[in-house]
Amino acid sequence: MHDENVIFCVIRVRRGIDRPMSVVKRLSRLDQRAFDAVAAARLPGFEYVLPRLSRMADHSLLWAGIAAGLAVTRQPRLRRAALRGALAVGLASPLANIAGKQAFRRPRPLVDLTGSSTLFGMGRGTRIPSVRVRSRLPTSPSFPSGHSASAAAFATAVAMEAPASVAVPVMAAAAGVAFSRVYNGAHYLGDVLAGLALGSATALATRVIWPARPGPARAVWSMPAEAVAGISPDGAGVVVVVNQDAGGGDVSATLRAELPAAEIVEASEDLGKALAEAANRAIVLGVCGGDGTINAGAEVAIARGLPLLVIPGGTLNHFSRALGMETVRDAIQAYCSGGVVRVDVASAGDRLFLNTASFGAYTELVGLRTRLEGRLGKWPALAVAAVLVLRHSEPTEVYVDGRRLRVWFAFIGNCRYGSHGVAPTWRGHLGDGLLDIRLIGAKRHISKSRAVAALLVGHLHLMPDYTTWRAGSLRLAGGDGPLRLACDGELGTADGIVTITKRRAALAIFGPARLAATSQ
């Protein structure tokens, strides 16, 4: 009898009767139950909406369409969102559909067109209404869900750049696509969850390739005594000079509609004269244009003791973006909030700059681009100029604080810039009293291609002869004649010694509410 019990136990073990259930089988059963629950759900209206939404997301066409719509807007934030979304989908889709599916090769739910589906290996069917089932069933492996990965990648990327009014609807569409994959019988819930995790992680990983733009830089908050008296919601006392070459009629029309009592001056020539005359009758001086135009307005505002209303109207608008203002309406809201902050300005001799000064290869690039852009347009001219500089540029001989150096490229920032490389793009503070100085020297052998790549791409802080430091001032002089110096993209020539200095908190400007909340 004892021997029979032993034999029986051995048989039970060999048959696996007493073996504990594996983790994979437990997860499969949970997937089965979740699939059954979703299949049993009846959501009026969604029976027709979700299958169509799922088809629109085939081959990421839905996300491509949304990205195209964001790209054609004139808002930089939305364009960045479109580009980051496309980049994220371009990375997530092959990871899910090629690497992931081939690595796991999980079969899909078996669905017939009569509305029944059988989960692979479960031995029982799950009814799904035929209206949900697509006529052409996917045959690729099931894990992870490629639709869900692309949806999560695009939505997460857009949320990193776009305002909530855009990000929330995109996230809702992504959630709908992900749910539809289970609701339509194409995927198990585990497939979808894995796809969502993969897509979100891929979108976050795009920051390694392209760092996300941070929030507005901090500034020095004005004391109450410096607040502007007589701020009027209709713009009374505001005189805005619009550079027609940068802004034009659309900007002027928006300003007149939002600030009907403001005076709008459109200037195309002798911008300095127009700004000086506007300052004579202004309580608030406004200026609309690119960074060069904003610099001219800042110089007049400081000289007259007026607060400056910065209105973006150029191609890049580095300074207004540092403030967190990317559109004309952002500037109008900043004015209506009545918040005045103070920011540093820097000067190269008698030339003021709010963002950067530079010499070396960049000045050649700017000069060539300026000569070509009338015929080619700005961006094609920039590309052609970069090729020509790559072929013909030579290091610049310059004295930096008395030391003679050979320099490929030099960057001098008004306040510390947060990103690495010689061409950083954002700042954390606009009132720290420092110059951010970065050089690519030519003491060692460095190819022209590497030097120009550093200029255009940045993130090459590990290359040879790259040095960086911060200081309150800097003395420069050309080694073999006048030094060509670009201040916020505007070229000039400096004879003899030019001293670059800082004037801390010298400029009063209107900042948005979120800028004031982080100011100190």
Image (cartoon, helix red, strand yellow):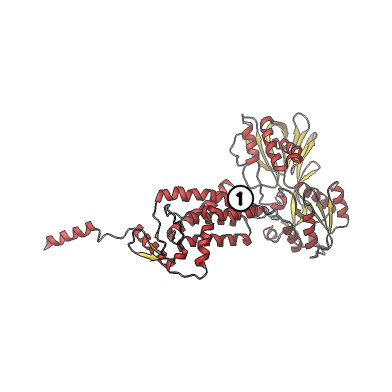
Q: Position of residue 40 (x, y in %)?
A: 42, 69
**Residue 191 placement, left or right of 375:** left
Q: Which amino acid type is shown beneath numbered disc 1?
A: Leu
Above or below residue 289? Residue 226 is below
Q: In the orientation shown, which residue stands out farthest toward the left?
A: 1
**Residue 84 visible in the snapshot:** yes
Q: Quadrant of the N terminus?
A: bottom left
Q: Position of residue 190 (x, y in %)?
A: 43, 59
**Residue 378 placement, left or right of 174:** right
Q: Nearer the viewer, residue 514 or 142?
A: 142
Q: Which residue is mark 1?
A: 83
Q: Nearer the viewer, residue 96 or 468?
A: 96
Q: Quadrant of the C terminus?
A: bottom right
**Residue 200 visible in the snapshot:** no
Q: Position of residue 404 (x, y in %)?
A: 71, 31
Above or below residue 183? Residue 379 is above
Q: Residue at x 52, y 55 (%)?
A: 58
Classify 10 Å Cα crowding around label 1: few (below 14), some (14-19), many (20 and above): some
Q: Position of residue 253 (x, y in %)?
A: 79, 58
